[in-house]
Amino acid sequence: MLHGETNLSADGRAARPAGVPGSGQPERWRWPLLLAGIIVVLAMVGGVSWKTTIWAENQSYARLAEEGRDRLILYGAALHSEVEKSRNIPLVLASDPSVVAILGFPPQGGGELEAETSALNRRLQALNESLATSAIYLLDDKGLTLAASNWNDGSGSFVGQKFDFRPYFLAAMQGQPGRYFALGSTSNRPGYYIAMPVRRDGRILGVVVVKTAMDDLEHGWSGGGEKVFVADHSGIVFLTNVASWRFRTAASLDHEARLRIDASRQYGEAAPLAPLDLQEDGLLASLDGNRYVMVSQVLPDGDDWTLHVFLNIDAARAQARNLGFLTAACLALAFLIVISALQRARLMRLYTRDLEQRVAERTAALVDANHRLQSEVAFRQRAEVDLTAKQEELVQATKLAALGQMSAGMVHEINQPLTALRSYADNAVTLLGLGRSEQVRDNLAEIAGLTERIARITGQLKQFARKSTGAAEPVAVRAVTAGALSLIAGRLRNEWVELSWEPPADDVMVWGDDVRLQQVLINILRNALDAMRGQALPRLSLTCWGDGDKVWLAVADNGPGIPASVMPHIFDPFFTTKAAGEGLGLGLSISEGIIRDLGGQLTAADGQEGGAVFTITLRRA
Ligand code: ADP
């Protein structure tokens, strides 16, 4: 293996590497692990969003408490100013001479007392209206009302009513200023009572009382949106902007306190009502099932009054919950992004690994193929060398065969000059005997000419038999053609062939080598002669022409031509239509190879006169 290890299983097939998805063990754990991961992530998201919600809630509660404390100050101040408003009125009235005078009259004071009382009633009425208090009235030392601002209110008038059960009266009769919050026993309206003893010569003659209504204050509190109550020292809610809370207890009452309240009819007949279900928990308080942020303060007025402000937490909780959801969503999104990034990275890793493996396999295959190609090339080169050697041998063998065939013609060719030689030699001997030396010299010259001719014929044969040098060099077309024609001159003559040949100029040169070109030409010429054997008027025509860097040499005959079925095979080695012993079928295949080697081309076609035309194309030199 070049890259990566592949495990082989028992049956020899490649098994998946461990750890790759789909391999046995990890696959079994994949889903449980995934499930556990999802649970952990969900738990984390849930935990963090829960914490965030709690934190946001606490922040909001602290803010609400801050707001509540501002409200406390505001509401406390309003209550204080309401109480303060009427504080000094009884103090002033207690030392008023007409008040003291009325109390000083004997019970049956007659007309004068009546007049005094009537005047006081009017004064108290005017005072009450101008100070916007609820009522101002004068009690004698038995608690009986002698004069009151509401003297002409009909059944609502205090005049003649007894208030000896009220703690403010009892306190004032003790010499203490009486301060007291209660539901009016006649008016049924809640109010704050301030009472002052009226003295003469150190003796307490009666009590002046001012009642300030608090319902306007309560209405004022309703506008703020918060719920508010003020509880007295017993824990009874006496001022509130929630009607259902009024006169209920914020703390449990002991028996004694309950008796005292009942006796003073402080909060009317029904009070105190069922206790409020108030539970405090830090800043929060639960009241009658609803939860609020609660802030409280003990007020400086009255006796241990406590002001409580309740702020609704619904909006804060909803806001905190939204923040929690938002956090959860953000976290989940972040987790998803991280998980998808991890998954992407994992896929990329797998893909890269796969790609690397495939590249490695491909490289290995290419290297392998390259090796095989190299050895193939080496093999082909060796084969080509062998083939070239074989081709050379074949060329030689073909040439020898041709030589054998040509030798008959040659013998005839040489026989002629030989016969002539003999007769010239015989004649020379006779002429020598006659002393005709002049004619003997002529005969000898003829003899020399004839030997010259024989030498030329044998020389050409020698050249034909020669092995080629193989190197291409500039060769004159005219000389090569002439050499080839001279080698078949005997056949041309004996077979009465009409030759048409217009040789080109000497300087028409081509790239080739004369031996091989001559061999090609002889091969084509002999084939043409063979084809024209049964022809009554055999005609052979050679044409040479050039154009640009090319030169063409065409050999046409008027033989039977090449049949269409034969044409595709004529250049195949060992293809011949000739009788056994007449042709090897190698001539054209070798010729075609030679011309190709020289950078040219050999083609065959049908001639205009019905025969065949072989055209050699060569590079001009
Ligand atoms: P061979 O001459 O030994 O048969 P060649 O390769 O020279 O082998 O020729 C192959 C064949 O091509 C010949 O047998 C012949 O059928 C055909 N051929 C070649 N030249 C001619 C031609 N001029 N006219 C007709 N047929 C030809």
Image (cartoon, rainbow, N blue to C red):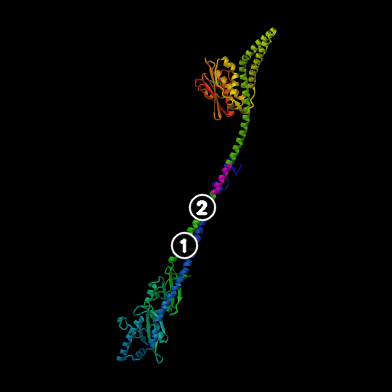
Residue carrying label 2: 340
Residue 197 covered by magenta stretch: no
Q: Which residue lies at the image location 61% right of the left edge and 33% below the top edge?
A: 377
The quarter of the image holding the C terminus is: top right
Q: Quick check: 237 above or below 345?
A: below
Q: Quadrant of ligand 1?
A: top right
Residue 468 picture quarter: top right
Within-10-Å neighbours for mark 1: few <14, some 14–19, many 20+? some
Q: Is disc 1 in contact with disc 2, using a CB cutoff of under 8 Å?
A: no
Q: Position of residue 75 (x, y in %)?
A: 42, 75
Q: Which residue is mark 1?
A: 323
Confirm whether residue 466 shows in the render. yes
**Is residue 586 at all visible to an observer of this figure?**
no
Indicate whether residue 360 is drawn in magenta.
yes
Give the quadrant of the N terminus: top right
By secondary structure, the bulk of the magenta-drawn segment is best described as helix
The picture places residue 162, in percent across and down from the top left corner, at 35, 84
The numbered mark at residue 377 is: none
Cα–Cα span, label 1 and label 2 = 25 Å
* Magenta segment boundaries in residue numbering: 348-361
Q: Secondary structure at mark 2?
A: helix
- The amino acid sitting under disc 1 is Leu
